[in-house]
Image (tube, rainbow, N blue to C red):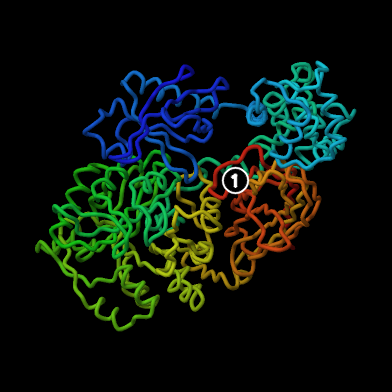
């Protein structure tokens, strides 16, 4: 890889161009250039690559499978929403050396400690700014670099630090001198204050000092002695201090910047919830129009949409099926210009990626517009491709009385679609023998039409009877799609395995008129909510409203970044990212009658106060690419929960400092239903004349917050990390008596 290799970059059957790829000496950057186009070169960082797929594992490579054998092909999958890079090597050996090499480099990165990551990041900047590649930088180059790094600083102060760091007195800084300069520049006065408050001698924290800090500030009640020992062992860089059972300021800074020092409680990271309750007792990470990579009018349909959603922990994906050519059903957004993909390719991708990040069940939500013939083909593909993974009958072969649990259904794929008759018929011998049954066609298109108020058309739509093949009907076990008429009707007639779907506007109408009824309904069966047909740009609604009434399958456009997806990622960041989060007990017990509009009526009602002191920010990313623009950051804290809890507060903005702004501003909130609250931190670049620019965010469930001094590691608009950007805060939660 360090020598360099010529490979073909493939964009389509007709676009295949040779490129020269080479790993740079830093073993972190891949550089590539066109063989013809003079000096045009590009680079990407190994840290941008999420995974390497071997063989024909992308649509582009599948389309040229007849030209190039799989052992010469591989795909680099990038983080966030950047397109994949499909490559064909000259030989199988060359492909293998890149595949193995890239995987090793990715693994090394993931195993790096916080300090190495920081040094790596500083080194990256150094190389970016070292224009003449001589491995040293004069003061002018350093000043320009500071601008690139979002630092607007007093030139005199910068020059003083520059001279102190220039140990060789050459008038330039070499690599390690620059790291020293950077560390002087980022001296953390805010952390030093805390350190000195607890340090007996101002130089180090003895084990007792550290225990006091863990008990009094971090509010860690249990076995602080053992924990203090572990922290010194894990984060203290000085062997001398370790021998003294003490922690230096460097070690303290490392601990506070680590995952243990972060705002997210590490004990909530793995699967910690009871996974043996009925499916309807969980919120389920769910995607809408999963096949789309962009908007729903002209966007590209792609199997990649399914792979990305499943790799993000999504457990319910949507498949819109229509009759296709040559007897093969296709998937696309009907009546629009979105491209089309084969149903069987979707099923293959789901089969392959369903359980890579979570072993809990995946629901295929099928929107069926096919005729009987192609429905039979769909059933064949489901059975043939998924095999044992497809759930074909109830778990114990008996007529069940409630939904099974995620634990019971591990490794299983469930089909949610229309069904002829009910589950009971298949047990008492009254199942229809006919090859097809009829049901009235109430699908999303009809719902959307109704949303659009073309009432007269929808009446016709509703009356049309669609034929359903018995084979496809038999693939549906615990998730029979039904039309919703009213909560009263459901209470009397509906079965636990029936799933009603609502557009967001219909769901909103119900939750406003009958919130407690909706919660009660969702304590015994599943509900799916999806975005309105008006959202042609594939934007998202706020999912919190729907979670407040216990809706489990709140389907969002995973391909669209923004507040909706931040909340979804935040809620599902707990419990091992497994895509299932247990609802609070007051939403699972039918007799509780929780009403999100009046949480104070709940038994055991206990509001809490949350106070957040926003202390400082570190290395916030640049928003404007313009050389001389520096951010004016402010921090907004948002509480998303029941209506009474929804609130936003902001710090003041700091002029011209995205590098190490300091606020010490305290924001206070009262939270009435803490079990449902999600907290979102947003950093923006203040602008008095136009809308503030987004800088970074971090969202987490209120129940997963740690108290005390904590770092919040910011995420980009896409939900990917932007090291080393962070906020430093102090958190206190108090019960209101």
Residue 221 seen: no
Disc 1 residue crowd, few under 14, some 14–19, many 20+, Cα 10 Å:
many
Q: From what the image shows, is residue 352 above or below residue 483?
A: above
Residue 718: % across, % down:
53, 48
Q: Is residue 109 left or right of residue 66?
A: right
Residue in front for this viewpoint, 58 or 668 = 58
Badge count: 1
Foreground of the two, 108 or 525: 108
| Location of residue 36 (image quadrant) | top left
Left/right placement of residue 122 relative to residue 718 reads: right
Relative to the observer, which residue lies in front, 556 or 304? 304
Q: Quadrant of the C terminus?
A: bottom right
Between residues 264 and 494, which one lies in front from this camera angle?
A: 264
Q: Residue drawn 83% across and 17% down?
A: 169
Above/below status of 348 relative to 363 = above
Q: Residue at x 55, y 43 (%)?
A: 720
The image quadrant that residue 115 belongs to is: top right
Which residue sits furthest bottom?
Answer: 456
**Is residue 99 depicted above or below 661 in this figure?**
above
Q: Which residue is mark 1?
A: 715
Up-down relation of residue 218 to residue 650 (above or below): above
Viewer can see residue 725: yes
Q: Position of residue 580 (x, y in %)?
A: 45, 50
- Residue at 74 percent of width and 28 percent of height: 251
User: Circle 1 — which element?
Assistant: strand
Residue 729 in the image, given as x and y percentages of width and height: 74, 47
Quadrant of the rendering where the N terminus is positioned: top left
Residue 182 is drawn in which quadrant?
A: top right
Residue drawn at (64%, 60%), measured in percent from left and top? Answer: 639
Farthest residue, direction right:
201
Residue 704: percent from the left, percent from the top? 61, 48
């Amino acid at each position: 890889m360090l020598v360099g290799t010529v490979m073909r970059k493939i964009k389509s059957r007709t676009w295949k161009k040779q490129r020269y790829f080479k790993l740079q000496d830093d073993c972190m950057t891949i550089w590539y250039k066109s063989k013809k186009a003079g000096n045009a070169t590009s680079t990407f960082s190994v840290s941008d690559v999420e995974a390497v797929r071997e063989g024909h594992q992308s649509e582009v490579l599948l389309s040229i499978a007849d030209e190039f054998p799989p052992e010469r092909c591989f795909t680099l999958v990038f983080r966030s929403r950047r397109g994949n890079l499909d490559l064909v090597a000259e030989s199988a050996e060359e492909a293998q050396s890149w595949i193995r090499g890239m995987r090793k480099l990715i693994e090394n990165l993931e195993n790096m400690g916080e300090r190495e990551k920081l040094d790596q990041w500083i080194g990256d900047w150094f190389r970016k700014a070292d224009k003449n590649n001589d491995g040293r930088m004069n003061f002018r180059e350093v000043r320009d670099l500071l601008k690139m790094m979002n630092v607007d600083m007093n030139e005199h102060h910068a020059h003083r630090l520059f001279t102190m760091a220039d140990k060789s007195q050459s008038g330039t800084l070499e690599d390690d001198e620059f790291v020293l300069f950077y560390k002087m520049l980022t001296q953390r006065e805010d952390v030093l204050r805390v350190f000195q408050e607890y340090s007996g001698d101002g130089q180090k924290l003895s084990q007792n000092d550290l225990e006091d800090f863990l008990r009094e500030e971090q509010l860690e009640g249990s076995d602080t002695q053992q924990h203090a020992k572990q922290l010194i062992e894990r984060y203290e860089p000085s062997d001398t201090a370790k021998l003294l059972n003490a922690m230096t300021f460097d070690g303290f800074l490392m601990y506070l910047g680590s995952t243990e020092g972060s705002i997210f409680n590490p004990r909530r990271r793995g699967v910690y919830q009871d996974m043996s309750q009925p499916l309807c007792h969980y919120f389920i990470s769910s995607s809408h129009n999963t096949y789309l990579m962009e908007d729903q009018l002209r966007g590209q349909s792609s199997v990649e949409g399914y792979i990305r959603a499943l790799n993000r922990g999504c457990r319910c994906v949507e498949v819109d099926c229509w009759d296709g050519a040559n007897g093969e059903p296709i998937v696309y957004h009907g009546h629009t210009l979105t491209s089309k993909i084969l149903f069987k390719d979707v099923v293959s991708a789901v089969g392959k990626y369903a359980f890579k990040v979570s072993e809990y069940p995946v629901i295929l939500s099928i929107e069926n517009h096919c005729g009987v013939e192609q429905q039979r083909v769909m059933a064949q593909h489901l059975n043939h491709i998924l095999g044992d993974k497809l759930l074909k009958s109830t778990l114990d072969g008996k007529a069940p009385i409630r939904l099974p649990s995620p634990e019971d259904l591990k490794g299983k794929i469930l089909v949610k679609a229309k069904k002829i008759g009910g589950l009971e018929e298949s047990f008492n011998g009254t199942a229809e023998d006919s090859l097809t049954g009829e049901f009235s066609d109430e699908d999303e298109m009809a719902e959307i039409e109704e949303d659009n108020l073309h009432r007269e058309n929808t009446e016709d739509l509703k009356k049309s009877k669609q034929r359903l093949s018995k084979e496809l009907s038999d693939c549906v076990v615990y998730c029979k799609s039904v039309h919703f008429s009213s909560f009263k009707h459901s209470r009397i007639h509906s079965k636990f395995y029936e799933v009603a779907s609502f557009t967001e506007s219909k769901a909103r109408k119900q939750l406003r008129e009958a919130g407690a009824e909706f919660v009660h309904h969702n304590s015994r069966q599943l509900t799916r909510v999806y975005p309105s047909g008006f959202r042609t740009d594939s934007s998202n609604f706020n999912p919190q409203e729907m979670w407040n009434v216990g809706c489990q399958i709140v389907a969002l456009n995973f391909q669209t970044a923004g507040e909706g997806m931040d909340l979804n990622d935040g809620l599902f960041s707990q419990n091992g990212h497994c895509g299932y989060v247990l609802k609070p007990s007051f939403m699972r017990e039918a007799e509780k009658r929780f009403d999100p509009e009046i949480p104070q009526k709940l038994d055991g009602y206990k509001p809490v106060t949350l106070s957040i002191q926003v202390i400082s920010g570190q290395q916030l990313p640049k928003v404007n690419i313009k050389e001389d623009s520096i951010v004016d950051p402010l921090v907004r804290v948002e509480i998303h929960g029941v209506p009474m809890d929804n609130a936003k507060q902001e710090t003041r903005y700091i002029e011209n400092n995205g590098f190490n702004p300091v606020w010490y501003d305290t924001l206070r909130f009262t939270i009435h239903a803490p079990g449902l609250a999600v907290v979102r931190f947003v950093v923006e670049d203040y602008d008095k004349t136009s809308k503030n620019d987004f800088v970074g965010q971090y969202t987490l469930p209120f129940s997963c917050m740690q108290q005390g001094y904590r770092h919040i590691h910011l995420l980009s608009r896409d939900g990917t990390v932007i090291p080393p950007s962070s906020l430093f805060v102090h958190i206190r939660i108090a019960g209101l008596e």
